[in-house]
Image (tube, grey):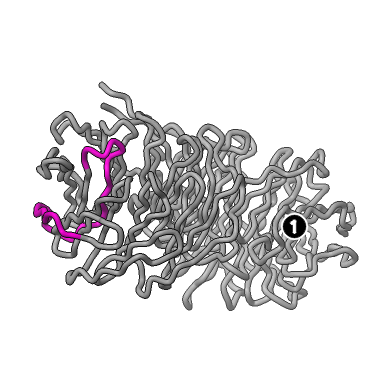
Amino acid sequence: MAAQLTETYACVPSTERGRGILISGDPKSNSILYTNGRSVVIRYLDRPLEVAVYVEHAYPATVARYSPNGEWIASADVSGVVRIWGTHNDFVLRNEFRVLSGRIDDLQWSPDGLRIVASGEGKGKSFVRAFMWDSGTNVGEFDGHSRRVLSCDFKPTRPFRIATCGEDFLVNFYEGPPFKFKLSHRDHSNFVNCIRFSPDGTKLISVSSDKKGILYDAKTGDILGELSSEDGHKGSIYAVSWSPDSKQLLTVSADKTAKVWEISDGGNGKVKTTLTSPGSGGVEDMLVGCLWQNDHIVTVSLGGTISLFSASDLDKTPVSFSGHMKNVNSLAVVKNNKIILSSSYDGLIVKWVQGIGYCGKLERKVNAQIKCFAAVEEQIVTSSFDNKIWRVPLLEDQCGDGDCIDVGSQPKDLSIAHLSPEVALVSIDTGIVLLHGTQVVSTVNLGFPVTACAISPDGTEAIVGGQDGKLHLYSVNGDSLAEEAVLEKHRGAVTVIRYSPDVSMFASADVNREAVVWDRASREVKLKNMLYHTARINCLAWSPDSSMVATGSLDTCVIVYDINKPASSRITIKGAHLGGVYGLAFTDERSVVSSGEDACVRMWRITPQ
């Protein structure tokens, strides 16, 4: 058997309140680059399901840029390292340089593709460095900044110039190469967040948290004019991008709007259009990043939503796509296996449709964090880090009003009886709680620490896994539990238990990287030696016909076993999710969907040999 990646539902850019993010792109391939955690994500604006992810950074990545010829990408991270890698054949690494002693906030290639300038946090040393892309040797001295430098840019035409701006409210200008300080402006009264030369090399713009944008002559560095304050932004301006013809500008701001400006030859700007992104108007709709590429105007909100406007038809409704920003810790497949629901611990539930991708977020009335998550056709059941279990009805696109049940202790695991979904089993530290609808039927103290649980689809049998690795089988009768058997095989705490869809088997997995498939009638081990992970197993899923079982682990792999073959004839998907796999589900006999720490959801097609 073999597995191939068919679809990737990408994560969104990592954002931070009160800071802009600098996204970039490549007009030739019409792709954009952004970062999330340690991943650098390449997305194609006209093909939303085609996503490439670079995962070689050892620390969270901050910014990435294409070289002028589109063959190389330079990406930087919070440790001050810049990696230069090829856009083709498996992202081959060209070079890695330690550029600054702190976080890098922006970098830019010179127009000839030979030099790179990077700026950021210096920790007492330099805040800006320019170097040769092949050798890493310095090409200049950058004095004149006293605090973190948030943005830098290379003039795209000769004579070369470098402009920088930062938290010391300064805009500095350097001539070269070798680059040396020429002049400095202190006309902003707050952090200067972004600085950009126009593509034709005549002008330079800086935008700031003081809601102002100032235009300079790109060659001399003198101030030409500024963005008009009438109809201007009412909040910090976080990012700016020029139109390809250098006649217009795009800015985004904390006031939740993007504005397109007409720039006169004299260097003054007036608002042409104000773009508002569709959203509820909450904090997560603040805009923090933007890019003008070909005919696309791209904006990124604090919640991570990417909106695409058409530059030639600004009144057209934008296309928005979003996703998760944090670890996606569980998946559920509903509505005849067509719709995938994924939840991340920050409380976000996203709906995906196979072949289409992003289909909206499920808004709940109470947006609590999510630890455990289960879904059946008409409702979702979640638990958060308090003692409450929520049952929320699932309408077409939205959630109805939910009910919550206090179970008296923090839930560890959650299982729904699929044939009678009002019956649910919740495990807590000391035992289990049996729920019927929103009523607690019984709370049973089992006398051992419980780590996982499962209830059979008809609600008559429960399996409880302990810290000691033992599986306890109980028959459920009304509100009472009677212990039927204790199964011993695991050598570590049980992490997950799942019944097969035909209910003839169940599978369990533990922290000691072992999974076991049991026969339900005889309670004997059905498939043994499932010991191919190198770390804790987090999740497990059965195929709808009960012929295959898949396990996902902290070691980033997904392993699929055929029940009727020995465990050694498995399929291993290596590196399925950077940082570990946390959610697994089958959508049909041959398709498995996985999610993980990298905030992505991936669809795999399994082909039998």
Identified by mark 1, the residue type is: Thr
Can residue 40 be seen here? The reply is yes
Considering the image in quadrants, where does the N terminus appear? Answer: top left
Q: SS of the residue at dot 1?
A: strand
Query: Would you name the residue on which mark 1 appears?
Result: 251
Q: Is residue 379 magenta?
A: no
Decide which of 53, 564 is in the foreground and name it. Answer: 564
Instruction: Name the side, left or right, on which 469 lies relative to 115.
Output: left
Considering the image in quadrants, where does the C terminus appear? Answer: top left
Instruction: Name the side, left or right, on which 380 lies relative to 436.
Output: right
Residue plotted at (67% across, 60% down)? 285
Estimate the x, y position of residue 256 in percent, counting from the top left.
73, 62
Can residue 156 be seen here? The reply is no
Decide which of 471, 9 is in the foreground and name it. Answer: 471
Estimate the x, y position of residue 111 in percent, counting from the top left.
62, 45
Estimate the x, y position of residue 174 in percent, counting from the top left.
65, 63
Estimate the x, y position of residue 467 in percent, counting from the top left.
18, 65
Residue plotted at (51% across, 71% down)? 121
Q: Where on the picture, by quarter, is residue 32?
A: top right
Decide which of 144, 437 is in the foreground and name it. Answer: 437
Q: Is residue 499 magenta?
A: yes
Q: Where on the picture, by quarter, is residue 70?
A: top right
Q: Which residues are magenta?
A: 482-505
Residue plotted at (20% across, 47% down)? 533
Decide which of 536, 89 is in the foreground and name it. Answer: 536
Q: Residues within 10 Å of mark 1 (few under 14, many from 20)?
A: many
